[in-house]
Image (cartoon, coloured by chain):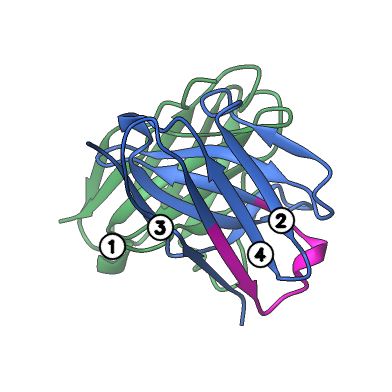
Chain colours: A green, B blue
Amino acid sequence: QSALTQPPSASGSPGQSVTISCTGTSSDVGAYKYVSWYQQHPGKAPKVVIYEVAQRPSGVPDRFSGSKSGNTASLTVSGLQPEDEADYYCCSYAGSTYVFGTGTRVSVL
Amino acid sequence: EVQLVESGGGLVQPGGSLRLSCAASGFTFSSYWMSWVRRAPGKGLEWLVKINPDGGAKTYADSVEGRFTISRDNAKNSVYLQMYSLRGEDTAVYYCARYRAGAYDYDYWGQGALVTVSS
């Protein structure tokens, strides 16, 4: 199972928006509505910010939103805050296993 | 409060074995699927394996099937990862994570255990 493809980096100024893409195949992202996104700060455990493509867990700011079209899912962080600077990973169900994305480092300029 | 605490990491020689443990608290452990995920230095997260609540169903990633074994002891609220024939590319921080079956996501993660495979 190959990793899902994400851009290595993305950046924006405070208050701006950034969108991260996550491209898979018709066997994972394209086949299921089970795409989740995880935020990981250095030295910390990952934290889920989006599940089932566009659902936000309790406690996650509504600045985080998700979508999917075909084999590509996207995470948008609106109104960037300094604390949003982190690594972000998508993850897709692949029919019994899971596959993560290559990861995107988001910088808040 | 849900807590997952990994232990058992360390330095091991290539070809060696190591067992990681993950102690869970703050929830009904025997009701949840559990997984192990790793992050190698400079790389991204990699999904490794999942186990169902009673331990009877396990699914592995191709990269570790046949070398890694997941198990659990619901009486001890713990999940384990037995690793054999370790290689340099297995060097990583290993996380245990609670799987939320209804949402197909991982809602709680441990802080990780570092495994270094080197001579």
Real-space Cα separation, disc 3 to disc 1, in angstroms? 36 Å
Q: Dot 1: what SS?
A: loop
Residue contact between numbered discs 4 and 2, judged by CB atoms under 8 Å: yes
Indicate left or right for A109 with A1 as reference: left
For residue B81, say whether it is visible: yes
Real-space Cα separation, disc 4 to disc 2, in angstroms? 6 Å
Residue contact between numbered discs 4 and 3, judged by CB atoms under 8 Å: no
Q: Amino acid at mark 1?
A: Gly
**Residue at 57% over, 40% down:** A67
Q: Dot 3: what SS?
A: strand
Real-space Cα separation, disc 4 to disc 3, in angstroms? 15 Å
Q: Which residue is mark 4?
A: B78
Quadrant hosting residue B53? bottom right
Tag 3 or tag 4, which sits nearer the N-term? Answer: 4
Real-space Cα separation, disc 1 to disc 4, in angstroms? 43 Å
Residue contact between numbered discs 1 and 4, judged by CB atoms under 8 Å: no
Choose mark 2 or mark 1, whichever is in front.
2
Q: Which residue is mark 3?
A: B113
- Residue A9 drawn in magenta: no
Q: Nearer the viewer, residue A64 or B116?
A: B116
Q: Which residue is mark 1?
A: A15
- Residue B25 drawn in magenta: yes
Circle 4 marks a residue in which chain? B
